[in-house]
Image (cartoon, grey):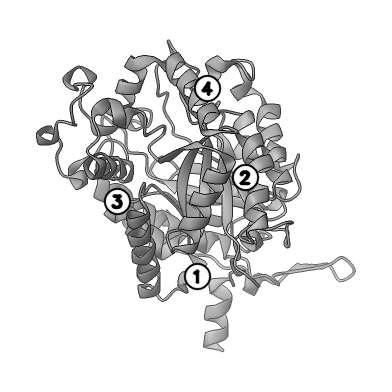
Amino acid sequence: MKKHMSIGMNILGFGAHAAAWRVGEVPADAYLDVEYYRNIARIAERGCLDAIFLADGPALVGDVATQPVGRLEPTILLTAVALATQHIGVIATASSTYNDPYNLARRFASLDHISAGRAAWNVVTNATDAAAQNFGLANQLQHAQRYARAEEFIDIACKLWDSWEDDAIIGDAGSGRYAHPDKIHSQDFVGQHFSIKGPLNLPRSPQGRPVLVQAGSSEGGKALGSRYADAIFTTQTSLEDGQHFYRDMKQRAAHWGRNPEHLKIMPGLSTVIGSSEAEAHARFDQLNAYHGEHGLIQQVAARVGIPAEELELDAPLPWAQIGEVGTYEQGSQGFLEAQLNLARREGLTVRELSRRILVGHRLLVGTPEQVADTLEHWFLAGAADGFNIMPDMFPSGVEVFVDEVVPLLRKRGVFRHEYSGSTLREHLGLPYPQSQYARSRHETH
């Protein structure tokens, strides 16, 4: 069977472009309406996409004076979305820095049960002081501390998800035997950050455990993702960088004793699609006009950590003021590195860079054929197992992708015509994970 790419649809508010809400495709409060998300999910499911994805953070960010800000809590929202769909996976973001393992493991196991095996957790560590200050801290934890906590957090979550063996439930009403107590395992875990007794207070979920997604491209993020993640959402903006990241992560996975094929690398792609290049650029120009020059420059300033007033529109980035990526504690190091590489490689001015990024990922303004070309090229050239698509605005951005791009990918034999499984793991081509406690029990007998 020919290998197919995986495709996720990232629902970022009204779209990847900050001015999308001003176009008026939907009401300005649509991002608070579950039917808005259900509609996008149904369209994506019509195209047999693997999953929808919700980013999140536990702080109010953005300019509330000029755009809708804030988000519904992802696991609650995606529970409602899952009940309105049948096949598509639901990926919710949650922080390992501002949650506790038991509650979060229980929440995602519940989502996996309710969705009949379509749930995934996107692990983030939240690199802002704004988030920290909502949880009794003056400043965020240092980068290394956040990732050390995340590693322990994921380890515990996996133990909790595995704490019931697959055949722990007997369910014999006649004899009154419900479960095998010896197949339900306490963790008695004591670590640097957490102490957890366990077990989880519900049986194994339909996927064995929810899919784990990770999106960090810093050194700490790569170490974490290669060890634990089933899929990695990443930020590279050139084919060469994408191929390098792909090879690196597969090698790291093998170092941990994993099958590299079971780690899916899924770069992000922001899309602005038109029936012709001229139409696509006109659509992009309209969005940029709403956003304004100031908004575009603010986007660059926020990414590189330099005040907008210190940036000259038609000059290169002030490289002397930009330190080593690994020294940045605020914001995503992966996003920063991808954008600095893009600006340096192509010699972009601040103005030019502002028109090459939306949310930090690779941006393509063009026709359905051009989008299909770049997805196919990266996939076949060993730079991606799939993609996380971020349309400029909803719902038209997902409609044109499903109705115009997906048929081209199918015609080229690189994307499915229908779902062949029922769980997100099956969509991604990932095996069902055996409980680690079942393995250890078999090893001792």
Whether residues under marks 2 and 3 lie with C-beta atoms below 8 angstroms apart, the answer is: no
Q: Label 1: how many residues lie within 10 Å, few (<14), some (14-19) or many (20+)?
A: some
SS category of the residue bearing label 2: helix
User: Which residue, given by chain and number where applicable, does mark 3 sit on?
Assistant: 218
Label 2 vs 3, first from the N-terminus: 3
What is the x, y in percent for residue 204? 65, 62
- The local secondary structure at tag 3 comes to loop
Q: Residue tagged by mark 2? A: 405
Residue designated by label 1:
261
Please give the name of the residue rendered at 13% of the width and 36% of the height, measured from the top-left corner: 319
Please give left or right for residue 249 compared with residue 75 in the image.
Answer: left
- The relative height of residue 198 versus residue 257 in the rendered view (above or below) is above
* Alpha carbons under labels 2 and 1: distance apart: 26 Å
Q: Amino acid at mark 2?
A: Val
Residue occupying image coordinates x 46% and y 21% = 285
N-terminal label among 2 and 4: 4
Q: Amino acid at mark 1?
A: Glu
* Secondary structure beneath label 4: helix
Of the numbered discs 1 and 4, the one sitting upstream in the chain is 4
Residue 302: in sight, yes or no?
no
Which amino acid type corresponds to the residue marked 3 in the rendered image?
Ser
For the residues labelled 2 and 4, the Cα–Cα distance comes to 21 Å
